[in-house]
């Protein structure tokens, strides 16, 4: 199910801020490519369902009060159905075709918050709109990318200290 963790982060992170403006990677041809990459159809209905799921999960990770009730609505009548295989039970999603990919994202979100409590979080850079799964041993990762947001935040902190030192008599 690592693929679905990748799907979860890809969906959560599909509204990056570029040049100061939020973008939507589910719009147009990039949305069709996004869905196809993860086994979806890329239909307009599927992309709309993914947008609704993304909004609910982003709000849930940020701790918004009504996110979980909205998530229940977005999930609709989807269900997991067992299928017996020589390797044991395999759980399959039973939902309308245009809703299956969003359902898989919700399952990945549920698994991540159970297996890694408190480690799925938004980037600590307020100007960033991305999320991370903190896999560090101490669980203290703050930024979606140390090379981008981490470096920016540390540079700002350093510059602030330099300014404060320069202003002292």
Image: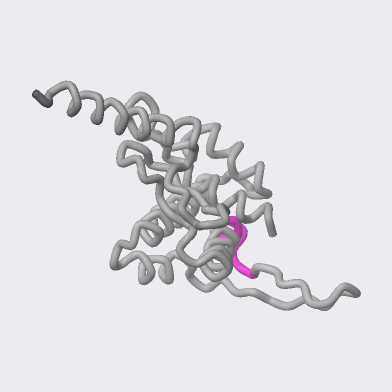
Hey, which residue is sitting farthest left in the picture?
169
On the question of residue 36 being in view, the answer is yes
The rendered magenta stretch, by its main secondary structure, is classed as helix
Q: Residue 120, image x and y in percent? A: 48, 57
Residue appearing at x 37%, y 38% in the figure: 128
On the question of residue 52 being in view, the answer is no
Residue appearing at x 56%, y 63% in the figure: 112
Q: Residue 108, image x and y in percent? A: 58, 61
Q: Residue 69, image x and y in percent? A: 36, 71
- Identify the coloring: one colour
Residue appearing at x 43%, y 31% in the figure: 151
Seen in the picture, residue 50 relative to 29 is either above or below; the reply is below
In-front residue for pair 36/62: 62
Task: Check residue 23 for magenta coloring.
Answer: no
Hey, which residue is sitting farthest right in the picture?
86
Quadrant where the C terminus sits is: top left
User: Which stretch appears magenta?
Assistant: 94-101
Image quadrant where residue 42 sits: top right
Seen in the picture, residue 64 relative to 150 is either above or below; the reply is below
User: In the visual, does 155 lie left or right of 160?
Assistant: right
In-front residue for pair 77/3: 3
Q: Residue 41, image x and y in percent? A: 63, 47
């Amino acid at each position: 199910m690592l693929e679905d963790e990748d799907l979860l982060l890809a969906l959560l992170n599909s509204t990056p801020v570029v040049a100061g403006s939020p973008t939507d990677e589910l719009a147009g041809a990039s949305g069709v490519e996004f869905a196809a990459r993860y086994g979806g159809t890329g239909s307009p209905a599927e992309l709309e369902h993914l947008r609704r799921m993304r909004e609910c999960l982003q709000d849930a990770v940020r701790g918004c009060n009504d996110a979980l009730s909205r998530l229940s609505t977005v999930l609709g009548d989807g269900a997991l159905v067992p299928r017996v295989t020589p390797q044991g039970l395999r759980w399959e999603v039973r939902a309308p075709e245009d809703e299956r990919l969003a359902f898989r994202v919700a399952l990945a979100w549920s698994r991540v918050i159970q297996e890694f409590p408190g480690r799925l979080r938004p980037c600590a850079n307020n100007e960033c709109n991305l999320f991370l799964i903190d896999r560090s041993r101490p669980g203290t990762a703050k930024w979606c990318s140390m090379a981008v947001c981490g470096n920016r935040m540390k540079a700002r902190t350093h510059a602030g200290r330099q300014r404060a030192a320069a202003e002292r008599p």
